[in-house]
Image (cartoon, helix red, strand yellow):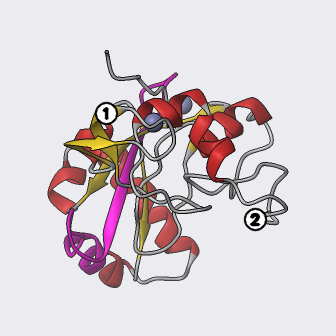
Amino acid sequence: MAEPTFRYHPHPLASGSALRIDHVCSVCGMARQIRYQGPVYGRQPDSLCLHCIHSGAASSALSISGGSDGDSDVAAMFSDAVDVPDDVPLSVVEEITQRTPGFAGWQQEAWLYHCGDGAAFLGPAGYRELEAHPEALAMLREDHQRYGWSPTDTEQFLRGLDRTGEPTAYLFRCLHCDTNLASWDVG
Ligand SMILES: [Zn+2]
Ligand SMILES: [Zn+2]
């Protein structure tokens, strides 16, 4: 059976949120080849397939009732709904947080939005990966400026970004205008 595709997370194997390994999914009980290995904000399954994320079965089966992240009306399952712009429909936020593979960061990660829609998550990125996307680097510089970092500190920080280490940046692409976006965290 073909693996499901996700509008907001097009390459979960490449991004590191899924692993190619034979397993039996805890939610559907089926033998599957691709296993989710991102965060679950709910009951922790032994093993979870991408089909169950895509269909919403995982979100229903694993959600802890009464849970709320306080920041929105949406019960987050695989990523949190924080800093969602007002022009993004609730249905998009639901699809991203409940039916899209999340990604593990050093802190709880926020999805990025652009042009009134969720952006597609491409994967973690270090300075080398970001250099190919000047607008994403510019976005990080603006972020730091807002937080009062000096340009020297910012450049030092950016050059220290590591795809597999800490700190890491997270690369997204707008599905409408193709702008590359980046978020970052420090552990
Ligand atoms: Zn499953
Ligand atoms: Zn855009």
In this rendering, the answer to whether 45 lies above or below 181 is: below
Q: Element at badge 2?
A: loop
Q: Amino acid at mark 1?
A: Ala
Label 1, on which residue?
A: 31
Q: Position of residue 182 (x, y in %)?
A: 41, 53
Taking depth in this image into account, of 150 and 109 the one nearest to the observer is 109
**Is any part of residue 54 visible from this angle?**
yes
Report the magenta residues as a range: 155-179
Is 100 one of the magenta-colored residues?
no
Residue 117, located in which quarter of the rendered image?
A: top right
Left or right: residue 158 versus residue 80 is left
Q: Element at badge 1?
A: strand
Q: Earlier in the sequence, mark 1 or mark 2?
A: 1
**Label ID, residue 69:** 2
Q: Is mark 2 within 8 Å of ligand 1?
A: no
Left or right: residue 8 versus residue 63 is left
Q: CA distance from mark 1 to mark 2?
A: 33 Å
Q: Amino acid at mark 2?
A: Asp
- At 70% from the left and 38% from the top, the residue drawn is 94
Crowding at dot 1, Cα within 10 Å, few <14 / some 14-19 / many 20+, comes out as: few
Crowding at dot 2, Cα within 10 Å, few <14 / some 14-19 / many 20+, comes out as: some
**Label ID, residue 60:** none
Figure quarter occupied by ligand 1: top left
- At 46% from the left and 43% from the top, the residue drawn is 101
